[in-house]
Image: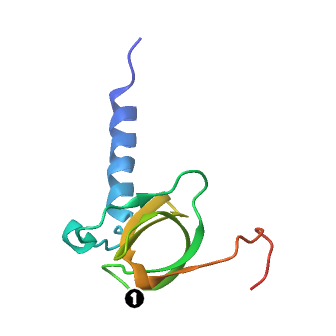
Amino acid sequence: MTTNRRYEEHFAAKHAQSLIDAAPPPCTLPQQAYGPQRIEWVKGSNPPVWAWVSWPDRAAERIAAHARGWNDRVVIVTWYGPRGQLDCVVWRNAVTHRRAESPGARR
């Protein structure tokens, strides 16, 4: 049994349009910024942090994220956005610890 070609073309076009409409990924630091010290990766649950993330098309914003790894210069942070999981590398001084809060907690 084969699939209708019009059906395939329709969903291929929708997929292509969704890629065009997707927001650009956050700006991440290049590997040269990491310095000579190795990244210490988290074992277990990632600690919650506030991270200032830069974007190519808008101003930097403070994101509730989790730290995956760090060294004396950079932190690798991850968070969930409208299109799924995002991650990037930011300067260490752009990250602060945050308390793990319940989803309904107020700031």
Q: Is residue 64 left or right of residue 103?
A: left
As drawn, the residue found furthest toward the left would be: 32
* In this view, 83 is above or below 94: above
* In this view, 93 is above or below 10: below
In this figure, what is the number of numbered marks? 1
Q: Who's the residue at 39% across and 63% down the image?
A: 22
Q: Amino acid at mark 1?
A: Ala
Q: Is residue 56 left or right of residue 69?
A: left
**Residue 23 visible at all:** no
As drawn, the residue found furthest toward the top would be: 1
As drawn, the residue found furthest toward the bottom would be: 59
Please tell me which residue lies in front, 40 or 26.
Answer: 40
Judging from the image, the colouring scheme is rainbow
Instruction: Determine the image quadrant of residue 1.
Output: top left
The location of residue 83, given as percent across then percent down, is: 49, 59
**Residue 21 visible at all:** yes
Q: Secondary structure at mark 1?
A: loop
Q: Who's the residue at 76% across and 68% down the image?
A: 103
The location of residue 53, given as percent across then percent down, is: 42, 79
Q: Who's the residue at 34% across and 42% down the image?
A: 12
Q: Is residue 33 left or right of residue 94?
A: left
Please tell me which residue lies in front, 34 or 87.
Answer: 34
The location of residue 49, given as percent across then percent down, is: 57, 74
The location of residue 97, given as percent across then percent down, is: 59, 78
* In this view, 11 is above or below 65: above
For label 1, the crowd category at 10 Å Cα-Cα, with few meaning under 14, some 14 to 19 and many 20 or more, is few
The residue to which callout 1 is attached is 59
Q: Assign the C terminus to one quadrant of the image.
A: bottom right
Please tell me which residue lies in front, 95 or 43.
Answer: 43
